[in-house]
Image (spheres, rainbow, N blue to C red):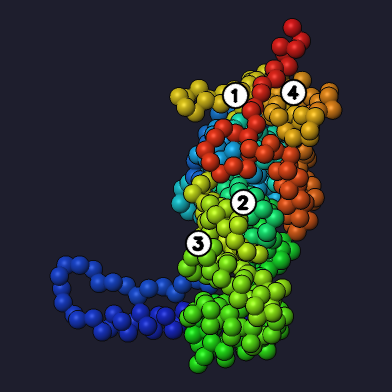
């Protein structure tokens, strides 16, 4: 009731503003209709549905398929990328948990249906179908945090065409972005050589992308994030103390440091480069004592400064005080600081933008569909440079005697044989796991638990890659992809 009263009050107020504006305009007739008072803007609506986070052609395809009778044909869609971004040896899958979290909210409620009807986007038959839409199919895929290569079937969506086609845009928008961030994060944490890397890029992304980026960065090995929403939603460790503005607010740098220490204790991180770094370090230790938690450097020659600051801290007796460096870091900058006495890296813009590769180029392709007699048939796109491989896939990773991965196995052949295939040797690890069965989401993949498992999983699978996989220079994928055709084995 309070919200309604507020809305009515604002409506009257805005009408009054609109009337006063039009009353103040000069009266003359130039043949142009005078502007009308603006209507009151509605209050922001809480929209739990994610169904319109999609492209229009998903719904127009559905409309045509409902009309011609093909909408309910059984289909298999696969998500994969045709190539890795230049310079990348592997990709990191992230976002699967977010897809599964969104799935129950992919419903068309009154607001969505009214919008579609009022704008003539789809016909009545399609609206009736959408009104009762719920995904009841099956989804399986690579575990979140897993590495992938060109052609890897990281997600398989199986159901009717009508059910599965509607999810295309949502799935791709999540997986492409999250996997780009996780892939960049993995390169950065690999370059850091065991030193913690922290995500602080929220202000370089849209507000919701910032949450997704923080989640994906942690999957890629980051130790924490500055984003509180991501911390609350996914149980991530959050970090952050103060910016230069806090120092500039106070009359002296000493006053600013004293305020922070009084508020957060001597274990705080103090930003020492607002004015003069050497003076800032001396003041920080004088105020906080030799138990000062850390100093942060955010500008200049970070490698040289870190050397000087480490010597100064040690001379002052603050031997346990850590050095945190920030300032437009990426994997190359982190690698260049490997010999510097840096304890922690903070990364912003580069990680939330995929460090030069803001998308993984993932596609969502129909690879099998039932024919008019109900038999599942492989289908494939043959367009130049965009060809796909028809039929359902299975996948496994082969390991050498030293425990390192040596190849990615892509299994194709008759649908029933591929669906039932399991590795017959101990050197193969299957890569596809069930995530949704008959519309029911497996809760192990979502929420804080899912993120924690994904981060652990990535740490393990990255360690299994050959050493060359971590090089930042251009090169081939870390391991080759080898095809296994099951009907060839039967001949």
**Residue 198 showing in the rendered view:** no
Q: In the image shown, does 422 or 417 lie closer to the viewer?
A: 422
Q: Residue at image x 57%, y 61%?
A: 347
Please identify, in this view, whether the residue under mark 3 or under mark 4 is nearer the observer.
3
Q: Earlier in the sequence, mark 1 or mark 3?
A: 3
Q: Which residue is drawn at 45% across and 82% down?
A: 12
Do tag 3 and tag 4 residues touch (Cβ < 8 Å)?
A: no
Q: What residue is pinned by disc 2?
A: 191
Dividing the picture into quarters, in which one does residue 320 lie? bottom right
Q: Which residue is drawn at 61% across and 72% down?
A: 311
Residue 328 shows which numbered tag? Answer: 3
Q: Which of marks 1 and 3 is in front?
A: 3
As drawn, the label of residue 418 is 4
For the C terminus, the quadrant is: top right
CA neighbours of label 4 inside 10 A, class few (<14), some (14 to 19), many (20+):
some
Mark 3–mark 2 CB contact (< 8 Å): no
Q: CA separation, marks 2 and 1? A: 35 Å
Real-space Cα separation, disc 4 to disc 2, in angstroms: 38 Å
The tag on residue 389 is 1
- Real-space Cα distance between discs 1 and 4? 14 Å
């Amino acid at each position: 009731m309070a919200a309604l009263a507020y809305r009515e009050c604002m409506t009257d107020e805005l009408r009054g503003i609109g009337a006063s504006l039009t009353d103040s305009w000069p009266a003359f007739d130039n043949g142009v209709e005078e502007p009308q008072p603006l209507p009151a803007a509605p209050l922001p609506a809480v929209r739990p549905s994610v169904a319109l986070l999609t492209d229009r052609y998903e719904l127009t395809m559905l409309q045509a398929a409902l009309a011609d009778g093909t909408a309910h044909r059984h289909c298999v869609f696969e998500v994969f990328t045709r190539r890795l971004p230049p310079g990348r040896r592997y990709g990191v899958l992230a976002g699967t948990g977010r897809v599964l979290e969104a799935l129950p909210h992919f419903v068309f409620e009154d607001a969505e249906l009214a919008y579609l009807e009022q704008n003539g986007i789809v016909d009545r038959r399609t609206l009736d179908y959408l009104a009762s839409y719920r995904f009841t199919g099956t989804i399986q895929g690579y575990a979140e945090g897993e590495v992938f290569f060109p052609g890897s079937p990281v997600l398989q969506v199986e159901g009717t065409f009508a059910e599965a086609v509607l999810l295309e845009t949502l799935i791709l928008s999540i997986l492409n972005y999250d996997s780009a961030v996780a892939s960049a994060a993995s390169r950065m944490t690999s370059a850091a050589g065991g030193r913690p890397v922290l995500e602080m890029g929220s202000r370089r992304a849209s507000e919701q992308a910032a949450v997704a980026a923080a989640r994906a960065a942690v999957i890629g090995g980051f130790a924490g994030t500055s984003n509180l929403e991501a911390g609350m939603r996914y149980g991530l460790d959050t970090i952050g103390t103060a910016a230069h503005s806090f120092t500039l607010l106070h009359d002296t740098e000493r006053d600013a440091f004293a305020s922070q220490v009084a508020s957060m204790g001597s274990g705080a991180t103090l930003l020492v480069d607002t004015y003069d770094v050497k003076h800032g370090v001396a003041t920080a230790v004088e105020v906080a004592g030799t138990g000062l938690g850390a100093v942060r450097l955010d500008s200049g020659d970070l490698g040289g400064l870190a050397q000087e600051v480490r010597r100064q801290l040690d001379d002052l007796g603050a031997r346990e005080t850590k050095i945190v460096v920030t300032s437009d870091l990426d994997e190359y900058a982190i690698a260049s600081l490997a010999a510097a006495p840096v304890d922690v890296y903070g990364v912003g813009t580069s990680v939330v933008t995929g460090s030069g590769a803001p998308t993984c180029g993932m596609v969502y392709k129909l690879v099998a569909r039932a024919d008019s007699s109900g038999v599942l048939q492989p289908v494939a796109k043959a367009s130049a440079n965009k060809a796909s491989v028809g039929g359902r896939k299975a996948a496994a990773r082969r390991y050498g005697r030293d425990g390192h991965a040596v190849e990615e196995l892509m299994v194709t052949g008759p649908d029933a044989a591929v669906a039932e295939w399991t590795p017959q040797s101990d050197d193969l690890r299957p890569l596809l796991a069930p995530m949704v069965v008959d519309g029911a989401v497996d809760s192990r993949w979502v929420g804080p638990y899912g993120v924690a498992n994904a981060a652990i999983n990535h740490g393990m699978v990255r360690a299994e890659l050959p050493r060359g996989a971590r090089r930042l220079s251009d090169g081939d994928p870390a391991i080759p992809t080898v095809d296994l055709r099951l009907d060839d084995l039967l001949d």
